[in-house]
Amino acid sequence: MAETEHITVATTSAGVGGTDEPGRSVDLPVVELLTGRGFVTGKSGSGKSNTASVIAEKLLDNGFGLLIVDIDGEYYGLKEEYEILHVGGDEECDIQVTVEHAEKIASLALEQNVPIILDISSFLDQEEAEDLLTEVARHLFAKAKKQKQPFLMLVEECHEWIPEKGSVNEVGQMLIKIGKRGRKHGLGMVGISQRPADVKKDYITQCDWLVWHRLTWNNDTKVVGRIIDSEYADAVEDLDNGEAFLMTDWAETIRRVQFHRKQTFDAGATPGLDDFERPELKSVSDDLVSELETISEEKEQTQGRIKDLREELDKKNSRIAELEKELQDARDMTRMAEQFTEALLDHVEGYNPGRTQKEKERTRQAQLRGAIEDGEGADDGEEVADESSEAESSEGESTDDQSAGSVGPDGEPTDESEPASAADEPADSADEPADSSDEPADTPDEGAVTPDTDESAPDATSGGGFGDAFGSFADGGPAISGGGERAGADGAGEATTADGGADATDDAGDEPDGLDLDFEPAASGNADGGAEVAFADATAEEDESGDADDRRESSTDEGPHSQPRFVVDLRTELEEMDEKTRRMLQYYVEQGADTPLNAHFSAGGSGDRTSAYAHNRELRLAGFVEHVGRGRYAPRLKALVRERAPDEPSATDVVDAVTELRSTIGTA
């Protein structure tokens, strides 16, 4: 670095305000320029940019570092003579830079003493340009505190960054910070503007040196009068191009001077009629920009990777949406299939929607167990007939054929009817099984068949029960169940004849398809078979009645505030869920349909998509929410209550159940 202490930039000129002999050299102290605060102003074409270029050329001639913030792209002409790094946002620059290059630019300028033109005019995005300038200024200020090296920063059109009126943005705040505190760290600043009235006066009044070129607008000349004197306010309008009033802290007088003409290509000159010929500009070495290029390459790779990750994320999100739609469609199809199955089962004879498959199996097993036990103890005909009679009377069912007689409170017929005499007749005419038929004679079964009628026995295929086609062997002879409508007493009476034995196939009616019922049982086998038929039917009916009681008992909780079993189960499912999952359900119930992300965030989550959908999936699989389109989910408590209820619940039951569930999740 040269040891020059002063640079010559102008000569004195004659005229109003001139206090020195015309033609004398005007020198400026280098240290004051590099570390102080300066201000150069003048209307367009008056020579202010030329003055800044002359100062820059003199500093570059002596090896001093500087950074020029070029707003209009008029300083690249310095490359005609000097190896200066031109950075910006287009291909005209030596290298294209972004905010990621800010620290490296400051490092090259201040630590490696590389002169730099930061061309803001080449950026199409003004916000991007401001961000870059802010970061470069911030890094310059931070490094100057450690470097303690004289360095100058020239800022064109500074009224855009530090305006007199309006708020000062982040760029302006950083520049004001450099202007106020940069001097003690060796960092100086020169603001250049064609409108002094628009520049913040706090900056102008703190400057160490000022250059006033020609100004004609009344507001601008008033600024000259307030800062210098009214005499200069009138004279500033008559200054020639390149001529200015120079005011400095190191000189006692204000001088009228004529600045030298810049030596390099004037890129900011107004185009004329002459042919424009751009000179050959010097380029910087490859080593100088290699690190900046590395930053650019890394940025491109990072942006490419980010783009790939975003595309991959979009694909996964789309796939998640597709899978959610498929799951919802499958759920809808399952629901439709269940409804279709229910509709078909409603048409099946004897179908009871309140009974589950497990209960039906229990009934079949009870019928089978009762028939086998009856076969082993067939001799106890009186007990079998009694159980059959009690089972028949507990059902309380009657048909047109069974309504001939009625039963009183004590179990005796209330009037003389044919079923009573019909029940007595088999007991009188039978030889061996007379003892087992006494009880049916006293308490006639509602389903007993009147022996005086000519109607044949019920068809084996018309009963629809386990005993319809069941046969067991007792005492060496098979007995055939007479169908669901044939009671124990009826079976006993029909199976026994006056002759002491009758063909079982006569009472059974037509044979069911696929069953070979052509056999001749013994007389004693007929009696046993009747008891077996009565016991099997009674057992089936008792089990069926017991199952119904079990269902009624199991459907409620014990206690003063009993709730249906399915409500207790739903409440238990809710209580076992994660607290955040219940809060998401609470959000759906209170707010209505919404996205899992919003529900998750409201429940205290971080808004993470994976976690949100994991909690939401638990609610959806349990049936508490359902997809309603466009990624939104809605609560379905009423529908879930109707699905879980063993029988069709009333509107009041649904409301009570939903209220209980809402209380469990905290929305009551």
Image (cartoon, rainbow, N blue to C red):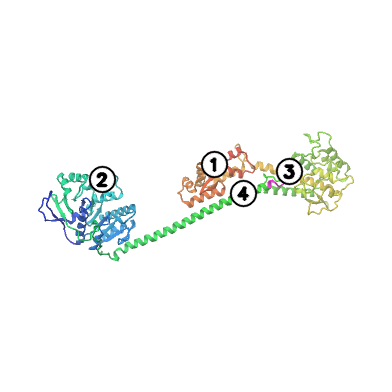
Whether residue 431 sits left or right of residue 375 in the image: it is right
First-in-chain label (3 vs 1): 3
Residue 108 position, x and y percent, is 28, 60
Q: Decide: marks 4, 1 in contact (CB < 8 A)?
A: no
Amino acid at circle 1 = Thr
> Residue 164 occupies which quadrant of the picture?
top left
The amino acid on which the numbered mark 3 sits, given as a three-letter code, is Glu
Q: x, y (%) of residue 566? A: 61, 43
- Does the magenta-highlighted stretch encompass residue 347? yes
Q: Nearer the viewer, mark 1 or mark 2?
A: 2
First in sequence: mark 4 vs mark 1: 4
Q: Earlier in the sequence, mark 2 or mark 4?
A: 2
Mark 1 secondary-structure assignment: helix
| Res. 507 mark | none
Residue marked by disc 3: 542
- Frontmost of labels 2 and 4 is 2
User: Could you tell me which secondary element the residue under label 3 belongs to?
Assistant: helix
Q: Please state the horizontal and vertical placement of residue 547, each as a whole percent of the image.
A: 69, 44
Residue with the mark numbered 4: 336
Mark 3 residue crowding within 10 angstroms, few (<14) / some (14–19) / many (20+): many
Above/below status of 472 relative to 385: below
Q: Amino acid at mark 2?
A: Glu
Q: Which mark is residue 164?
A: 2
Q: Amino acid at mark 4?
A: Met
Mark 4 to mark 1 CA distance (whole Å): 30 Å
Dominant SS of magenta comes to loop
Q: Is residue 45 placed above or below 354 in the rendered structure?
A: below
Label located before the other in sequence (1 or 2): 2
Which residues make up the magenta segment? 345-350
